[in-house]
Structure formats: C-alpha cells, structure tokens
Amino acid sequence: MLWIAIRMLTGDKQKFYGLLFGIAFSTLLITQQLTIFVNLLERGASGTYNVSSADVWVMDPVSRTTDVAYALPSTALDQVRGVPGVDWAVPHLRAQASVRTKDGDLEGVAIIGVDDATLIGLPKNMIDGSTEVLSQPDSVIIDDVGATRMFPGQSPIGERLELNDQRAVVRGVADAIPSFTSTVVLYTKYSQALRYVPGTRNRLSFVLVGAADGIDAKTLSERIEKQTGLKAQTRDEFARDGVQFIIENTGIPLNFGITVLLGFIVGVAIVGLTFSLFIRDNIKQFGALKAIGVTNGKIAQMVAVQAGMVGMIGYGLGVLGTVGFLTAFANDPTFKGFYIPWQIPLISFAAMVLIIVLTGWIALRGVMNTEPAAVFR
Amino acid sequence: MSATEATTGSQPAIRTRGVTRDFKAGQQTIRVLHGIDLDVCPGELTYLVGESGSGKTTMISIMCGILWPTDGDVEVFGTDIYSLSDTDLVNFRLQNIGFIFQQYNLIPSIDAASNAAVPLIAQGMDRLEARDRAVAMLDKLNIADQADKLPNQLSGGQQQRVAIARALVHEPRLVVCDEPTAALDAKSGRRVMDLLREVGVAEDRSVIIVTHDNRIFDLADRILVLEDGRITHDGTDMPEDH
C-alpha cells in the first residue's frame, strides 16, 4: 500500500513539485537565514578570534568588546606583567581613523596596533607579504576584506594611503575574519599606531596576556582582576561578550528571527495548502480504499509516507540550496568564512518535521473523517 | 466469530431483519429505511431499483458494511457484521466484499493492472504476485492488453472493466455495484454488464447492483424495487407500472 501511496503522490506532478518547492523553499530560508545570522553574530567576536595567541584579554572595567573599549593608562601593561602566572603581556591598540585613498575617497578604517617586538595581535596567516614588512617605515598590513573593498581588482601592495593625514604604505594582506561591520582594518606596529591615532592621554586599548605553563586562563584572569583592579577575560569569555553585545544592541536577532518565522509560515502555508488539495483531489480514492477494506491505520501510514517523502526530498534540496548559496558566494567578502554549524540543519530539520506533521495531520483528518459510505453518494 | 470465519452453505448471502436508518437534517430526523427484511441468495444477480431518494444507496451501504443501521440486523454469509469490531468489520469487507463504483474511483497514477490488484495488495500479497493475478482477471474481462495503461488512457467502459476486475480479483463472496452503467453509453454499458454477469456471478457469490438503467433490467435474476424506504416489489421482472 505504501508503494501505491508514493505513486499517488508522484503521479500528480504539479502538486508533488509544489510540495517539494514548499518544503525546499522553507528549509532554504530557515537554514540560510540562520546560517547568516549565526555567522554574523560570530563576527562580533572576530577581533578576539583574529588574535589566537592571547589567552587573556585585560581591559578597563567598562570595556565590553574589542570595538567598545575605554583606553587604559600605559602603566596597566607593567601591572599585568607583574601578576604571577603571566608568561607574557603585550600592548594592543584599537582605534578608528580616516583614510584618504589616492582617488580622493574617504574611508573609515580600524587601526590595530600590535606589539612592536613580537607582533602579537596580528592574524595568524598572511595572504600576501609577510609580517616582517611592518619593520619598514609607515608600513601597514590590510585585511583581505578591506583590500577587496578599497582596491577592487588590483593588488594593494605598495599602495600609499593618507591615514589621519599621515603617510601609510600597504605592504601586506592579512587573512583575517571580517568584523561585524566589515570595516577595513589596518594593522601596524603599536608605536606606529600611536602616531596615526589622534593624541589622547591614554591610548592603550587592551593588554594581551599569555598564560605560563600549568596555569589555566580562567584562573589567571581572576588573578589579574584581583591584583590589578582591571577587567580580565579569557579569550572565549571575551568572544562570547562580543557576540552578546550584538545580540543586545542590534535588531539583527529580531530581523532574522522574523525571516526564519516567515520561512516557517510560508512552508506551512504552501505545503499545507498543496497537501490539502492533493488529499482533496484523492479523497474519492481514499474513500474507495476505506470501503474496500484498507484500515484507517494503513491510510494514516500512506499519508505519513507521502508527507515523509516530500519532507525528506524537500529538506535535502533546501539544505543543498544553502550549501550552493554559500559556495557561490564564498569569494564575496560579505560571506567570507561562512559555514553551516551542524546545529542549523538539525533546527531546520525539526522545523520541516513540524511543518510536515502539522500539514499531514490536517490533511489526514480529512481522510479519516471521510466515511466509506461517501463513495456511493 | 471473527470477520473471516463466515460460513457458506444453504444460508442466504445477505439476511436483513428490521433494518431502519435515520438521518438527521437539522432538527428533523428523517427515516430513510423502514424495517427492511430481505434475503439475498448466493449465485443471484440482484438489482436494487428505485427513484432517487428511495433509499437504495443507503440500503446497499448497510448491506456491505460501510454504513451502520439505526436499528435491525444484517448478516452476510452468516456473520452479523455490525456486531464485529471496527477492525474486524474492515477486514471482513477486505476478504469478502468487492466494490464497483459509479465513477470507478480508480487511482489515476497507477496502471490498470495495479489498480485491479489493490485488494490483494491491501490483503498483504506481494505486489508483483498480486499484479499477475490482476492481469489474469483483466484477461477474463478482455482487457489484458490494457494492463499497463493508466486510467486516463482508457475509455469509460475499459475503466469500468478495470473496476470490475478490482472488485473480483480477491474472489469475494459478495459484490456490490453502484450504478455501474450510469457513466457509460448504451453499448458499453451492455457489454460491461454482460461481462459482469459472465465473470462475476458464481454459485457461491452474490452480486447486488443498484441501478435505474432500464436497458439492463433483462440481465437480472431478481429485481427489488425500493420506494420511500420500503421494498414494494420483489420478482424476476420489473413491475408493469415502472
């Protein structure tokens, strides 16, 4: 009977494809939007993830994220270095600046000043050039997304910039996770960054700390806080705060939540309507089967198989669509590094099952309520 | 007694006693059948004839176990079918009754042989084996060459023959037909009824047909006329005034 159920479904091509489209579209919308949402949120932690060697971030107690930080006095560096368990501690500067390109355009950029001696603070990998180029005068390294944005279709190496009215020369391209706002990021030595950033009394944004062998980051951060009065967070804690900041201070969760909800509603509407039409068109056949002697349980199995088949194929197409979307836009800076966390296909699968169960149940009610005697009317 | 343990022998195929059926219409209760007593014998081709609204569809629905009577008893081959559990009654129908509908009610997306094989598949028989038996039945009805065609590729007469094959393929002891010629032209209707009589009627099987098609009255072994929920005529021919 299940074979008959499948043939009944696939035989009505218009409705079969309509059902597949409904599920696939809904799955695509839910999966793709959740994927973009999660990846965008994770960009709130990009500043932290880009500095993989720091175990602990030390900052002013009011600082919240890598981009929302209140400057520390330069003495903070020595204070932190004096805490037992600190293997190394380096200064880290993050500031906003304006760049005038050679075409005369003005671009807001983020300047990151990394430790002069160790270059801790730079992203791990370079796409073009080496980290050593920062030893040359006026050198800056640009992040790859910034390079694409400021120098589309050309190499940025050797390009001269007017950075806060001072000369800067791009000598390398870093492979970095873009920030939430995809701002162009220029890396330079800490001492050089101090020259680029307009003078204020305190300009040290963070102290990056490496833990000595045998001490875990959490213990060390607590010790630093206790001893210095500064705020210290492990890398993971600080990354999580970056994500949390976006959740709390932007409309992104609401907007994406609405889109995901719409995807679900569209799925229910399209699949529900099409499935109900399919059942209604076949109600005489189902009635005949009931009269002949097919039990309600068997009929329910038939409808469940039809719904399940549509659900699985549609879901597969939807997820494939999302993978295709990410593959197609893999080189687009907006979607750089985007991936599908394993939880998202599970969530969209659950949504698909909910759609199928809901619409299948509504459709099944129509069949169950059909009296066998109706076939003689 | 379970649904499949109905016994055969000299007993009637169908025995109804005091069958009544009421329908609710708003606040009103309308009695459609008024205490029908009826015996239908095996080997007979019985027609149930009457005007629209006379109660013949209700009567045939009750006789084949798909509509509960308000009152009265219905025995099919000795089984009091409405004393069976729901599951046993469904199984009884599957094993013992074949159905032919006015609009055929074939499944449009499976071929003629698979349509004819539905009762066997529902009984749990392997699909290919069931299909082979269905093709053999289609052969008896002279449309084995159409076995691979979908219903919409067949004429009305051919579709009704597929429906007849579906009703007979599992060798039921009771076959009920609702206006089997209503959607067919005179020639096709006659041919379908000739085949149904030839293949369907057997010594241990009873065929009951609801019809008002006077072109096929001559094929009946027995004609029952139903008027306003009562049997007003029981004979081998139609009464003069009809």
Image: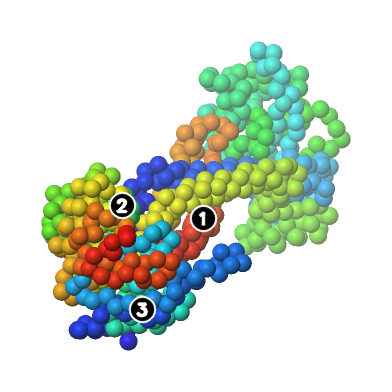
The residue beneath circle 3 is B37
Foreground disc of the pair 1, 3: 3
Q: Nearer the viewer, residue B25 or B204?
A: B25
Mark 2–mark 1 Cα distance, whole angstroms, equals 37 Å
The residue positioned 38% from the left and 64% from the top of the image is B57
Among numbered discs 3 and 2, the one appearing first in the sequence: 3
The residue positioned 76% from the left and 56% from the top of the image is A224
The residue beneath circle 1 is A359
The residue beneath circle 2 is B182
How many neighbours does mark 1 have within 10 angstroms: few (below 14), some (14-19), or many (20 or more)? Answer: many
Residue type at the position of mark 2: Ala
A148 is higher (above) or lower (below) than A295:
above
- What chain does badge 3 belong to? B
- What chain does badge 2 belong to? B
Badge 3 element: strand
- What chain does badge 1 belong to? A
Q: Nearer the viewer, residue B121 or B76?
A: B76
